[in-house]
Amino acid sequence: MATRKFQIYRGDNEKGEMVNFETEVMEGMVVLDVIHKIQAEQANDLAIRWNCKAGKCGSCSMEINGKPKLSCMTRMNEYKPDETTTITPMKTFPVIKDLVCDVSWNYTQNKRIKPVKLAPESKTEKGYVMYQKDVDRAQEFRKCIECYLCQNVCHVLRDHDKKDSFVGPRFMIRVASLEMHPLDIEDRIPELKNDFGSGLCNITKCCTDVCPEHIHITDNGIIPLKERVIDRFYDPVTILGRKIFGVRKKKLPPLNP
Amino acid sequence: MSTNTITDIHEKGLFKTLRTDNWWLYPGLVVFGLSSFLIYGFWSAWQADYYWYSAGQGGFGGYLAPFYSPLLFIKEGVEGAAPMEHSLFGAWPSWWPAWLPPSPSLLILAVPGIFRFTCYYYRKAYYRVFSGTPPACAVGSLPRKGKEGYKGETGLMIVQNVHRITMYFAVMYIIVFFYDAYLSFFRGGELGIGLGSLLLLGNPILLTCYTFGCHSIRHLVGGRMDCYSCGMMGEVAHNNGKIVGWLNQRHEFFAWFSLIWIMIADFYIHMVSMGNIIDPSTWSF
């Protein structure tokens, strides 16, 4: 057990301060444990959003020593015993109180995306037919716990405040999971380019770096979507191919393997 | 206990961060790596001489510096120039401006240069270090002014979409480099091996690993499909995706490894051609 120093943001969206705390840290503690300890012993009104404490609910997102992380998955032994650990709310979203942010903007982005439209010819008496290898890619994106750390670290939203023109990495992979769905026959490529802001992402991969589920957001989600935009709007070879051979109908998994 | 500090949680500005780790290390290394390559590339292209070595022997075989391949035109009478039969289009053109050195390299560097410039990996690297968008994750970006502010790849950088087109040409370069490697195992028509042969063989192998890990190729050979259970083409796309996907996961590694290797190979051929380095080889026995 050792006494460690912390600076925790206390305040709202307009004003706040970094408040100093010192508390005993025991082996095996995570940052969320420390916050709970400080809340119990020194600052009963310290606001923190948390739920599962297992890295699966995505509630306790914050910035620890300036890095976006889940506090429940960040062990205290990552930090030197003599350093002061700073704990701040996510920078990209409005602060409600202390470490709790208003992330409701994200929900509005989700509503902008056209929902899945399943091909009716793939429906059988037993349900829709598809195979594991068809859904391998999209399943990676289904691991998302919506912690919004990727939205928080994305500089397009964080520094340039382009919330009106870029949906952010989380919703880019939501679009990717639908576009790559083997049974989906909806077309979201035009709005991906014109409304969702695929061109605003400059591939700096910070979203991938901070993802607690280790989803390859940029390489497997955003870049493939950018490639589909290029197919449609920029590659003269594929554009010419469509002019000559027409738009090919999406192939659907066979009903009988 | 020290005093509390008033803070603006949403404060913005270049390099603003609460990060305490060495976040500047990666951009620092990228600045060093890319700057070194650019300086060397311009130096090599500007030389216009000593890009070929065959120990003074005619016939089939010799080392060709990779920054000069393919040889579209050859200027005769230049020290260390390749024999005229290696030129694709013959003698050096008369329209070439006098203020530019008659370097075959200046004619062919644009395509691989643009291919690398528009590569998804290099974009990450140089956006971070040269345009500060952002310098590192959760480190303040360079503020953008103007009516629209930050435009990403929708403004001038919409040009990044030519990556797909340059990729088509980059694949052709690999074929040329493999031919150069084949050529390097001969001297005066005699089969052999030298250190230069190994460097020139490693070059297209690494470039293949880099190019075929390209996100654009991954898209074309399988990524654009959504149904992998759809017949033979689906199966082929699925298998392609596995191979290219393996390379794609190592795209950054091969981007740097191939870049450093081609630089070393090119410098080595220059030095051997100038007589500054003796090429250890089976032909000298």
Image (cartoon, coloured by chain):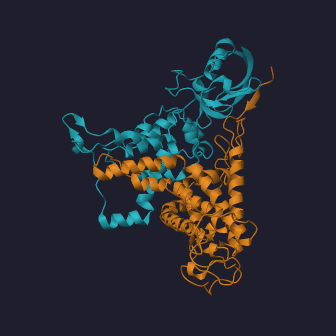
Chain colours: A cyan, B orange
Nearest the eye: B212 or A251: B212
Position of residue A134 in the picture relative to residue B262 (left or right): left
Farthest residue, direction left:
A125
Residue B69 quadrant = bottom right
Any part of residue A1 in sight: yes
Q: Residue furthest bottom?
A: B94
Q: Position of residue A189 (x, y in %)?
A: 40, 52
Residue A250 visible in the shown view: no
x, y (%) of residue B262? Answer: 63, 61
**Residue B43 appears at what percent x and percent y?**
72, 68
Residue projecting furthest to the top:
A41
Residue under the point 75% across and 30% down? B6
Q: Could you tell me which quadrant the C terminus of chain A lies in?
A: top left
Is B130 on the left or on the right of A246, as rendered? right
**At 64% from the left edge and 16% from the top edge, which residue is drawn?**
A39
Residue A158 falls in image quadrant: top right
* Figure check: B278 above or below A92: below
Nearer the observer, B277 or B167: B277
Q: Looking at the picture, does residue A102 appear above or below residue B133? A: above
Residue B158 picture quarter:
bottom right
